[in-house]
Image (spheres, rainbow, N blue to C red):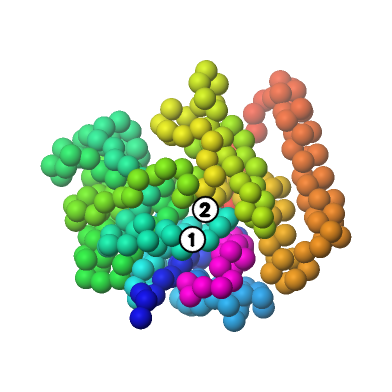
Amino acid sequence: MPEQRNILTIATGKEYYINLAINLARSFLWWHRDNNIRFKLVTDKPEYIPADLKDKIDVHSISPGELGIGFSSKLHLDKLAGEGQTLFIDSDCLIFGNLKHLFDLFKGHKVSVVGGYISEGDWFGNIKSVCDKFDLPHLPKFNGGIYYVEKGPEATAVYEHARQIEKQYDEIGFVRLRNQPNDELIMALAMQLHGQTPIPDDGTIMSDPQACPGGFKFDVISGERWLLNPPLPDKRHQSWYPFEKVSPLVFHFLGYYTADYQYIRESYRLEKAMNGKLNWMAEVSGKLRIDVPMKSIKLFKNIGRPLYHVLFGYRKVKSSKRI
């Protein structure tokens, strides 16, 4: 009997997060209509799950605050993962193809991520100082939008240690993200201490607009997608990201990108498609209701912002929906 394969995401706290998770679930279902991969959504707001998803995904209800706050929920994946292989994907992602082969890539790793290693420099703290403190050659460096877990005692040991490390976060010298301990640093240290390794990042698994500030284009229904890290001498070039143009299976909409018209439009198209209502009329309606007004507002803001700054100075930055 083949080993069970699972996709897991977490959406707790604000309604904003459950809405993101709904979009992720729909993108998964669109690309996995004929396979045995299960999709599990852990949430403290199960009442928001729409009718088109209720009988197609596993919903695991928890109490508010049960998994902690901020990024702490990701330190409990050993308890939330299903039997067999589990691929955790952040709720602010969309899927653009079948993920079956990722389970083959990760198989045999008890806890893993997509990335490489870092031994010095700054990554939410002085990495060399942390490595020296724990007598380690390096730490895995990765984006915590994806974690892989094979349920069992090895994974439990890593995550139990991670939950202990979280209590020492400031003492170790790690820097907080949005005033909360960052799961990436905690998991990097726990993984290294337990001999768990990442699989190499080749740009095909997951990417995001911060790594690729040169623009992007995507169509979640057809699977078309690309992101660009403009080459030097372009000032936007991200020297730490080793790729120029990538087409990842998982698009991570970090920060404010979930408020971008392109994400909102594709979420609308997914909802229509999953309910059998995506036709030319729905496409036109989406462009008129989403693309046109939001692109116009964005254009006017870009044109008027320099003048506003000259006349009135800089406004206070608005609080993020993610806080």
Q: What element carries label 2?
A: strand
Which three-letter amino acid code belongs to the residue tagged 2? Answer: Val
Place of residue 43 in the rendered image (x, y in percent of width and height, measured from the top left): 50, 71
Q: Residue at x 41, y 71 (%)?
A: 5
Look at the image and give the residue range highlighted in magenta: 19-37
Q: Which residue is drawn at 16% across and 42% down?
A: 136
Q: Which of 298 and 146 is in front in this view?
A: 146
* Depicted 223 relative to depicted 13: above or below: above
Query: Which disc, if any, is residue 99?
Result: 1
Q: What element carries label 1?
A: loop
* Depicted 280 relative to depicted 85: above or below: above
Q: Quadrant of residue 77?
A: bottom left
Q: Residue at x 30, y 71 (%)?
A: 151
Q: Residue reaching furthest left?
A: 135
Place of residue 181 in the rendered image (x, y in percent of width and height, measured from the top left): 36, 51
Q: Which of 68 and 277 is in front in this view?
A: 277
Which three-letter amino acid code belongs to the residue tagged 1? Answer: Leu
Q: Nearer the viewer, residue 140 or 277?
A: 277
Q: Name the residue under label 2.
A: 250
Give yes or no for residue 24 being in the magenta stretch.
Answer: yes
- Name the magenta segment's main secondary structure: helix
* Quarter of the image where the N terminus is located: bottom left
Q: Are marks 1 and 2 in contact (CB under 8 Å)?
A: yes
